[in-house]
Image: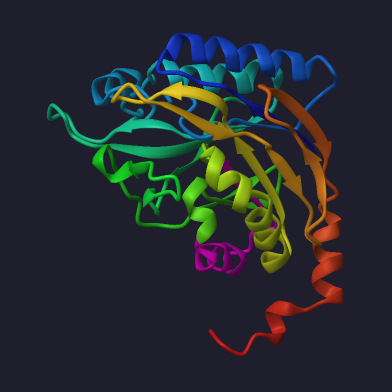
């Protein structure tokens, strides 16, 4: 499987973010056919006020309805490049009432542009980092309540988003559900990223003996209170043995890697962790 990770520097400007995503995907696809494209977390609107987040979000279609700008953009990318698209995550409107909270939701489309999966982020980032910066994702978003797997090009794939990576029980559940590959879009803070990003991505790959594709945002953005915040970047792909096969730096851009899915069964046969488990 040939996979492209799209590392963006989003702002609160939805249209500019769409243009950036399309530019990087075009550049990556120009280097050769792709099987899967992965975008980062909340690439449609990073930072900004609650009002800006709502303006950049949309209701997702039901029963074959036409979707909004973001939905149709992801659908058209899949169709244009004949590629699976994991749409990172975008703001999903959940209720008609004014000011209702959004969901932080991943969408997956097949090469025909048919939606194959939706996943709402379960664990919301309500923390204070060591430098005193506070984050309250639950002020704007509602949590999901269900794990999700989807077959991408016949590969059972688990879905997670950013802060989910700190909860190994979710990844164990995705492995139990048959996942051989796990996709994690993220908008990791620069501070937590320096300390924990690679350690946790590799740990989740080792624990689940799965490929882990972690696609992050990078650069700075303006938060709703006017403060400047930074995300870490360093998108990476890690194999089932925990080896990093692709790692980007801190600049916006893209990277492509070839994934040998047979490596999953090889690692699991040689080290049958699942069969050796005692505590469940």
In which quadrant is the N terminus drawn? top right
Q: Is residue 4 above or below residue 119?
A: above
Nearer-the-camera pick, 9 or 25: 9
**Would you say residue 46 sits in the magenta stretch?**
no
Q: In this picture, which residue range is highlighted in magenta?
A: 167-186
Residue reaching furthest to the left:
97
Residue at left offset 85%, top offset 49%: 260
Q: Is residue 73 visible?
A: yes
Q: Is residue 195 left or right of residue 64?
A: right
In this picture the colour scheme is rainbow
Nearer-the-camera pick, 9 or 85: 9
Q: Is residue 161 visible?
A: no
| Percent coordinates x, y for residue 204 in the rendering | 65, 61
| Percent coordinates x, y for residue 22 in the rendering | 61, 14
Residue reaching furthest to the bottom:
278
Q: Is residue 182 left or right of residue 89?
A: right
| Percent coordinates x, y for residue 56 in the rendering | 35, 19
Nearer-the-camera pick, 167 or 251: 251
Residue at left offset 82%, top offset 23%: 33
Q: Is residue 253 left or right of residue 57?
A: right
**Would you say residue 182 sits in the magenta stretch?**
yes
Q: Is residue 233 above or below residue 143?
A: above
Residue at left offset 71%, top offset 13%: 26
């Amino acid at each position: 499987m040939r996979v492209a990770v799209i590392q963006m520097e989003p702002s609160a400007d939805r249209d500019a973010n769409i243009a950036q995503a399309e530019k990087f995907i075009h550049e990556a696809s120009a280097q050769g056919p792709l099987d899967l494209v992965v975008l980062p977390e909340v690439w449609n609107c990073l930072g900004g006020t609650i009002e800006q987040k709502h303006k950049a979000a949309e209701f997702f279609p039901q029963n074959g309805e036409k979707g909004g700008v973001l939905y149709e953009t992801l659908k058209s990318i899949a169709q244009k490049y004949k590629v699976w698209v994991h749409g990172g995550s975008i703001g999903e409107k959940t209720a008609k009432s004014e000011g209702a909270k959004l969901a932080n939701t991943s969408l997956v489309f097949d090469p025909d542009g048919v939606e194959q999966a939706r996943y709402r982020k379960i664990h919301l980032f309500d923390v204070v980092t060591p430098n005193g910066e506070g984050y309250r994702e639950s002020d704007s978003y509602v949590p999901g309540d269900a794990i999700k797997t989807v077959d991408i090009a016949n590969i059972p794939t688990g879905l997670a988003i950013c802060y989910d990576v700190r909860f190994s029980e979710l990844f164990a559940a995705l492995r139990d559900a048959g996942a051989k590959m796990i996709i994690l879009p993220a908008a990791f803070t620069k501070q937590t990223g320096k300390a924990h990003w690679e350690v946790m991505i590799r740990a989740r790959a080792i624990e689940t003996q799965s490929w882990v594709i972690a696609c992050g945002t990078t650069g700075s953005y303006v938060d709703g209170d006017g403060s400047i915040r930074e995300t870490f970047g360093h998108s990476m792909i890690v194999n089932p043995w925990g080896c990093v096969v692709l790692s980007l730096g801190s600049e916006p851009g893209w990277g492509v890697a070839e994934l040998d899915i047979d490596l999953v069964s090889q690692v699991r046969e040689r080290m049958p962790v699942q069969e050796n488990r005692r505590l469940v």
